[in-house]
Image: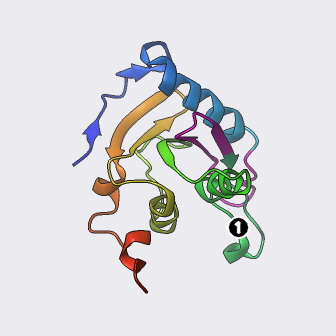
Amino acid sequence: MGHIVPRAGRSVAFMSPEIRELFDAALAVHGHAYAPYSNFRVGAAIRTDTGRIFAAGNVENAAYPQGACAEAGAVCAMASAGERRIVEVLVVCDGEGLSTCCGGCRQRLREFAAGSVPIHCAGPEGVRATFTLEQLLPESFGPENLVGF
């Protein structure tokens, strides 16, 4: 189970500089997310093993299946820049409840991240909980499963 941070727990003022940097990047794109149908804005930021940060917001579409998750956009930007290893993720979501990455995005992250990679789930006020990718996607299928094929 993930480590749930009390609601007033890890506010922006109490984040480490590394988490704050991810939070600021995710919050910035969260504000630009395009969510006219659900009004559920999401911003995601990922840090690579070289220290670079890539961020994206969700983009909805009137033809619902054509929308894009924030995490997918950040992964696409990362891969397009030639980066291949994710070492940390932070996602900012609207709403009062705890929101984690959807199943499809968990699998997208898994392509470039080890099971031990922390995924911070946040609201606009700060981090609400932190999980590892393995906790969110146990016994996952990844690139190593295809070695030798």
Query: Residue at (44%, 70%) from the top-left corner?
Result: 143
Please identify the residue farthest to the bottom as the structure is shown.
149
Query: Residue at (56%, 30%) from the top-left corner?
Result: 23
Q: Which sits in the foreground, 53 or 84?
A: 84
Within 10 Å of disc 1 (Cα), the crowding (few <14, some 14-19, many 20+) is some
Q: Which sits in the foreground, 48 or 126?
A: 48
Under circle 1, the secondary element is loop
Q: Decide if residue 16 is on the left or right side of residue 91.
A: left
Q: Position of residue 44 (x, y in %)?
A: 59, 45
Q: Position of residue 6 (x, y in %)?
A: 30, 28
Query: Residue at (52%, 64%) from the top-left corner?
Result: 108
Q: Position of residue 144 (x, y in %)?
A: 38, 70
| Residue 43 within the segment the image draws in magenta | yes
Amino acid at circle 1: Gly
| Residue 38 within the segment the image draws in magenta | yes
**What residue sits right under mark 1 in the picture?**
67
Q: Which residues are magenta?
A: 33-55
Q: Which colouring convention does the figure follow?
A: rainbow
Q: Which sits in the foreground, 44 or 39?
A: 44
Q: From this view, report whether residue 102 is shown above or below residue 71.
A: below
Q: Quadrant of residue 30?
A: top right
Please identify the residue farthest to the left as the structure is shown.
1
Please identify the residue farthest to the front as the structure is shown.
148
Q: From this view, report whether residue 19 is shown above or below residue 53.
A: above
Query: Residue at (36%, 53%) from the top-left corner?
Result: 133
Specify the quadrant that holds the C terminus. Answer: bottom left
Q: Quadrant of residue 94?
A: top right
Q: Which sits in the foreground, 116 or 35?
A: 116
All told, the count of numbered labels is 1
Q: Position of residue 111 (x, y in %)?
A: 49, 64
Q: Decide if residue 102 is on the left or right side of residue 10.
A: right
